[in-house]
């Protein structure tokens, strides 16, 4: 009886995973039915009719649509270029703020009046411009993907070598007393709330980067990437350290007995032996970096530029959800797109975790049992 | 590092020296970064912390005054979160260590689910909080009872979201504590004729209370600094008064910092407040973390 109660409570974690699946996807799925799944408020009903009606009304508006995109693109960049370099205050991450536009409800009404045809979502999502509030909202996820990739890449490029090398130092080279200092210190870094790291980058790192590289934009992908690497380092360090320490002592002793030195053993025997674990550490680091929200909102500039330059502002998928979800109209297309982005974040993190759990651990075990 | 390198050629020894040096530099760099983080916030934040700062409401559009409602809101939030999350986490840990056969499919799926939960980005928990707790549960309760209290973001739904987010933290540390209870104790109890549940309730749990406490404290430390997950489930810029019930909206230290740092009308004026708020938030999380580490190290020694 009690055992069954505990069993049921224990299944809570599984249930939650399923609930996340169902409820995040449910809200996103409303996009594909045309009608929102949760018409809870008055505004969402208005919006539903607004998006449905003009669709058949003027289906071939490709010409003016692209024209509109071009002007808006330049408008955005001019606006950003004029406002950013001169600013000295550390606290204006939102160079381009879609939320400062007119109230979303009134936009919907205006859209009906002027009969501007919204692009169908399937085309809109690949349009290459993210401008969710406006006369014809654009949900091109391209810039967001570029931003996410850029910042995650920088974070891993900085975080992975630092984390792995520090793990090697702690596992093999450091004397015992030093390890007792280094290990808890780096793990302490994991205890920093991400909003604090975000603020640190916004206030301190951004100034340093601008002074060093003389960048046009004070907040850019590099600053964001450095911030994310601070969040990623303790994860990579901890897991890599575990993996390196778990390599059987016999391997090390055999290598030393054959006449190789301590560092040769560390770099050529132990590191390759722990490779799957180190790989898992980097994968989990990637998972943390692309899902991180507060650092990405505060330190990257948060503008959907779609530029590959590391000195241009970037906006990540997670930051987009974080900064726009609060103002969105319930059940609108924008709302659905944000949930779709969230669902994709969930799928990727789930996949990364599944890979590390099922594949890497199995390989690691096989390797050591065979050794 | 007392390695015999006598027969190594000179370039190889140089290479070896560099190999160790590079690793040591990486470790030093990270520790220095950590120190600079602490140093910045203590140096710039400490002068502005006073009793007035901690006990007053923010004034003049968040450019003056204190952080009392944010501090109180955070405390209430994590308390409610622990009440909701710790029993579930403890029960799961009990199942995993005491009842489950480690090879059974169910036990393995629970473990997989816990690991997955630990890796889900916190913003996704935020969306889950909106989609499930507010829109589904809250609106459902409102429709069923005819009230209008639950269908919006509130302290209750934010705590529930955070309870789900911190569940893996609780499970992992309680599990560790349960495993530390010697087998002999369990076997002795079972040999005297106690049932499995009696053994757990009277022998295992009393012996792992500190572990459960550690888990809760770690979860609270994580929950106190989490902002992304509660962005859409009830946190607000400012309140007139402290939340009087669990269905009201609240202020939160981390969110307060975010608002001060990104949406402040007068940045120069608010900068000292930002550093001071950060220091309070850091102090809170690290006080909790250090307590947990201390309890845990004592537990390991005994």
Image: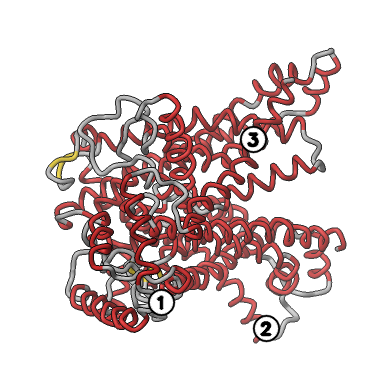
Q: Are the residues at dot 2 and dot 1 in contact (C-beta closer than 8 Å)?
A: no
Q: Nearer the viewer, residue B294 or B84?
A: B84
The residue that disc 1 covers is A128
Between the residue at mark 2 and the residue at mark 3, the CA separation in whole angstroms equals 43 Å
| Colour mapping used in the image | secondary structure
Q: Is residue B290 visible?
A: no
- Left-right relation of B164 to A277: left
Disc 1 crowd rating (10 Å Cα; few below 14, some 14-19, many 20+) is some
The residue that disc 2 covers is B12
- Left-right relation of A267 to A169: right
Which residue is farthest top?
A: B193
Measured as percent of width and height from the top left, residue A164 is found at 59, 66
Q: Nearer the viewer, mark 3 or mark 1?
A: 1
Q: Are the residues at dot 2 and dot 3 in contact (C-beta closer than 8 Å)?
A: no
Residue A11 in the image: above or below residue A35? above
- Please give the name of the residue rendered at 75% of the width and 44% of the height, measured from the top-left corner: B108
Residue A192 in the image: above or below residue B78? below
- Please give the name of the residue rendered at 55% of the width and 29% of the height, measured from the top-left corner: B213
Between the residue at mark 2 and the residue at mark 1, the CA separation in whole angstroms equals 53 Å
Measured as percent of width and height from the top left, residue A218 is found at 27, 72
Disc sitting over residue A19 in the figure: none
Q: Are the residues at dot 3 and dot 1 in contact (C-beta closer than 8 Å)?
A: no
Q: Sequence-wise, which precedes: disc 2 or disc 3? A: 2
Disc 3 crowd rating (10 Å Cα; few below 14, some 14-19, many 20+) is few
The residue that disc 3 covers is B300
Say which element carries label 3: helix
């Amino acid at each position: 009886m009690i055992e069954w109660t505990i069993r049921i409570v224990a299944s809570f974690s599984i249930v939650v995973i399923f609930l996340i699946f169902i409820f995040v996807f449910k809200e996103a799925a409303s996009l594909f039915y045309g009608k929102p799944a949760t018409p809870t408020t008055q505004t969402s009903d208005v919006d539903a009719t607004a998006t449905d009606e003009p669709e058949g009304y003027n289906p071939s508006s490709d010409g003016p649509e692209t024209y509109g995109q071009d002007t808006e693109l330049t408008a955005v960049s001019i606006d950003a270029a004029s406002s950013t370099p001169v600013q000295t205050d550390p606290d204006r991450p939102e160079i381009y703020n879609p939320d400062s536009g007119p109230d979303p409800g009134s936009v919907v009404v205006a859209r009906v009046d002027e009969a501007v045809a919204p692009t169908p979502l399937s085309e809109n999502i690949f349009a290459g411009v993210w401008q969710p509030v406006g006369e014809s909202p654009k949900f091109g996820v391209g810039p967001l993907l570029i931003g996410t990739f850029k910042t995650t890449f920088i974070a891993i490029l900085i975080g992975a070598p630092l984390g792995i090398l520090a793990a090697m130092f702690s596992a093999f080279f450091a004397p015992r007393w030093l390890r007792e200092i280094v290990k808890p210190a780096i793990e302490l870094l994991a205890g920093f709330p991400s909003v604090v790291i975000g603020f640190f980058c916004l206030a301190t790192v951004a100034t340093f980067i601008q002074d060093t590289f003389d960048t046009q934009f004070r907040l850019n992908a590099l600053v964001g990437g450095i911030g994310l690497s601070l969040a990623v380092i303790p994860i990579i360090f901890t897991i890599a350290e575990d993996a390196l320490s778990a390599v059987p002592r016999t391997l090390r002793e055999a290598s030393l007995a054959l006449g190789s030195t301590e560092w040769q053993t560390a770099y050529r025997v132990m590191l390759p032996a722990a490779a799957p674990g180190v790989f898992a550490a980097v994968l989990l680091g990637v998972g943390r970096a692309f899902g991180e929200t507060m650092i990405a909102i505060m330190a990257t500039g948060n503008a959907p530029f779609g530029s590959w330059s590391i000195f241009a502002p970037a906006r990540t998928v997670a930051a987009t959800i974080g900064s726009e979800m609060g103002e969105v109209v319930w059940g609108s297309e924008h709302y659905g797109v944000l949930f779709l982005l969230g669902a994709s974040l969930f799928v990727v993190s789930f996949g990364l975790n599944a890979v590390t759990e099922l594949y890497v651990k199995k390989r690691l075990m096989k390797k050591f049992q065979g050794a | 590092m007392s390695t015999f390198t006598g027969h190594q050629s000179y370039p190889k020894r140089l290479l070896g020296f560099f190999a160790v040096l590079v690793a040591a530099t990486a470790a030093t760099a990270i520790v220095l970064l950590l120190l600079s983080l602490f140093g910045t916030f203590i140096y710039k934040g400490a002068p502005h912390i006073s009793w007035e700062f901690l006990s007053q409401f923010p004034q003049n559009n968040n450019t003056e005054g204190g952080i009392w409602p944010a501090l109180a809101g955070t405390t209430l939030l994590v308390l409610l979160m622990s009440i909701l999350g710790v029993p579930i986490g403890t029960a799961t840990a009990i199942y995993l260590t005491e009842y489950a056969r480690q090879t059974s499919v169910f036990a393995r799926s629970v473990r997989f689910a816990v690991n997955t939960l630990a890796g889900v980005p916190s913003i996704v928990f935020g969306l889950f909080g909106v989609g499930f707790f507010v829109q589904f549960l809250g609106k459902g309760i409102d429709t069923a009872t005819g009230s209008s209290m639950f269908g919006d973001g509130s302290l209750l739904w934010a705590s529930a979201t955070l309870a789900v987010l911190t569940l893996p933290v609780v499970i992992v540390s309680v599990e560790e504590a349960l495993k530390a209870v010697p087998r002999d104790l369990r076997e002795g109890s079972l040999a005297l004729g106690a049932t499995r549940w009696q053994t757990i309730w009277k022998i295992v749990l009393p012996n792992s209370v500190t572990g459960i406490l550690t888990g809760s404290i770690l979860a609270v430390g994580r929950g106190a600094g989490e902002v992304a997950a509660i962005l859409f489930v009830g946190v607000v810029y400012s309140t007139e008064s402290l939340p009087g019930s669990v269905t009201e909206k609240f202020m939160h230290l981390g969110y307060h910092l975010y608002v001060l740092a990104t949406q402040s009308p007068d940045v120069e004026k608010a900068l000292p407040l930002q550093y001071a708020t950060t220091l309070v938030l850091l102090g809170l999380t690290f006080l909790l973390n250090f307590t947990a580490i201390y309890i845990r190290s004592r537990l390991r020694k005994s």
